[in-house]
């Protein structure tokens, strides 16, 4: 007859064993959750760049953030295009470097950026997809947080409907004013208001032909996309988007040839947008400048700029209510 080799565990002993297991799991879980990411507050955050391209100051922007325990990642905005992802930002001993995939560049070559941090300021070089190297400087982007909501002033008509007074271009002018309509019949220069603004409410109406493209730049730095995207998905580079950063909640674009409206409120870097009577962006923070911005001086007031270098576009009823 075989002996019964089963071990009888006393109920009290089993209870103690279970308690010990739970305690060990709790300690392990707590330790894992108390492990701090290896990000570096010296470099993390948003930076406003200026790139020296053959003597011309070109605005740019960088955000650095930690991802888990070992990696810094980010986003980068250059002279044109949208925010580009940075899969890894290397930062050690005050030195920073990273690469970017090409976007609208003709060359199929990564862009490389390197620099150093000293006294809270970044300096370095960027080598483009074309192989040319340029110097850049970077400073911390301002938060633009407001202590209180603005008191709104009197609404101002920015475009008279009669002439181009109060506006200018930085190149040859192709814009025309006729019968209350501001039109750009062909791609050319952007149209810039002489007046500059901090916080404001803007009403603007526009009309485009099929497949055309334009944009309304708030303070000359943050583009709201104007494009023929009816029936498409709401994306970060389509109608009603803060280009490259914020997608609209839904696509409300009308057909080409129809007049459409944007009603925008910008306070600090917080934006709300009602497009064609539908709120598609509600109190969202714009991270930084978008491609094609006039400058990267985010702490300063700026103009309204209408993009005229992409396609045929018409605007009318441009009304702004500045904050006091």
Image (cartoon, grey):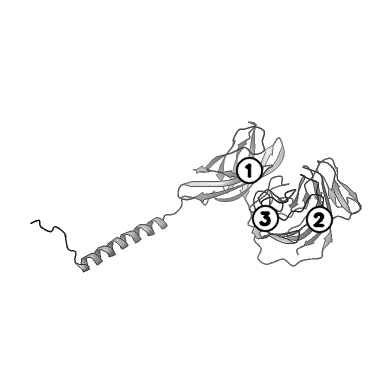
**SS of the residue at dot 2?**
strand
For the residue pair 286 and 299, the one nearer the viewer reads as 286
Residue at 67% from the left image edge and 33% from the top image edge: 106
Q: Where is residue 253 in the image (x, y as percent from the top left)?
A: 74, 53
Closer to the camera: disc 1 or disc 2?
2
Query: How many numbered discs sit on the rendered protein?
Result: 3
Q: Residue furthest left?
A: 1
Query: Local crowd at mark 3 within 10 Å, few (<14), some, or many (≥20)?
Result: many
Mark 1 touches mark 2? (CB < 8 Å): no
Q: Residue furthest top?
A: 131
Which numbered circle lies on residue 273?
A: none
Query: Local crowd at mark 1 within 10 Å, few (<14), some, or many (≥20)?
Result: some
Q: Who comes first in sequence, dot 1 or dot 2?
A: 1
Instruction: Identify the residue under disc 2.
Output: 205
Q: Position of residue 247 (x, y in %)?
A: 65, 53
Instruction: Identify the residue under disc 1.
Output: 137
Q: Who comes first in sequence, dot 3 or dot 2?
A: 2
Residue at 37% from the left image edge and 58% from the top image edge: 29
What's the CA distance linking mark 1 and mark 2? 37 Å
Instruction: Identify the residue under disc 3.
Output: 248
What's the CA distance linking mark 3 and mark 1? 32 Å
Query: Would residue 232 be visible to someone looking at this image?
Result: yes
Closer to the camera: disc 3 or disc 1?
3
What's the CA distance linking mark 3 and mark 2? 18 Å
Looking at the image, is 90 positioned above or below residue 323?
above
Q: In this view, does 244 lie to the left or right of 191?
A: left
Q: Where is residue 157 in the image (x, y as percent from the top left)?
A: 85, 59
For the residue pair 66 and 55, the one nearer the viewer reads as 66
Query: Local crowd at mark 2 within 10 Å, few (<14), some, or many (≥20)?
Result: some
């Amino acid at each position: 007859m075989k002996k019964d080799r089963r071990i009888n565990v006393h109920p009290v002993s089993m209870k103690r064993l279970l308690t010990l297991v739970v305690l060990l799991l709790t300690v392990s879980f707590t330790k894992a959750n108390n492990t701090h990411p290896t990000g570096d507050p010296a470099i993390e955050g948003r930076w406003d760049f200026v790139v020296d391209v053959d003597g011309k100051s070109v605005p740019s922007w960088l955000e650095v953030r930690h991802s888990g325990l070992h990696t810094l990642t980010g986003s980068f905005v250059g002279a044109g295009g949208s925010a580009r992802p940075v899969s890894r930002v290397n930062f050690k001993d005050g030195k920073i470097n990273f690469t970017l995939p090409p976007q609208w560049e003709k060359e199929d070559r990564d862009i490389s950026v390197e620099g150093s941090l000293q006294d809270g300021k970044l300096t370095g070089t960027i080598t483009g997809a074309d192989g040319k190297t340029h110097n850049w400087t970077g400073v911390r982007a301002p938060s633009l947080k407001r202590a209180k909501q603005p008191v709104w002033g009197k609404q101002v008509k920015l475009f008279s409907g009669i002439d181009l007074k109060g506006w200018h271009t930085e190149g040859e002018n192709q814009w025309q004013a006729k019968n209350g309509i501001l039109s750009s019949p062909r791609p050319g220069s952007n149209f810039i208001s002489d007046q500059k603004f901090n916080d404001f409410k803007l009403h603007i109406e526009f009309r485009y032909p099929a497949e055309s493209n334009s944009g309304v730049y708030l303070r000359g730095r943050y583009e709201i996309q104007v494009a023929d995207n009816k029936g498409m998905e709401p994306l970060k580079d389509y109608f009603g988007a803060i280009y490259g950063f914020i997608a609209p909640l839904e696509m409300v674009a009308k057909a080409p040839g129809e007049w459409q409206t944007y009603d925008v409120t910008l306070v600090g870097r917080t934006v709300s947008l009602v497009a064609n009577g539908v709120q598609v962006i509600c109190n969202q923070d714009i991270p930084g400048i978008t491609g094609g911005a006039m400058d990267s001086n985010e702490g300063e007031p700026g103009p309204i700029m209408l993009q005229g270098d992409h396609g045929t576009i018409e605007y009318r009823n441009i009304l702004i209510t500045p904050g006091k």
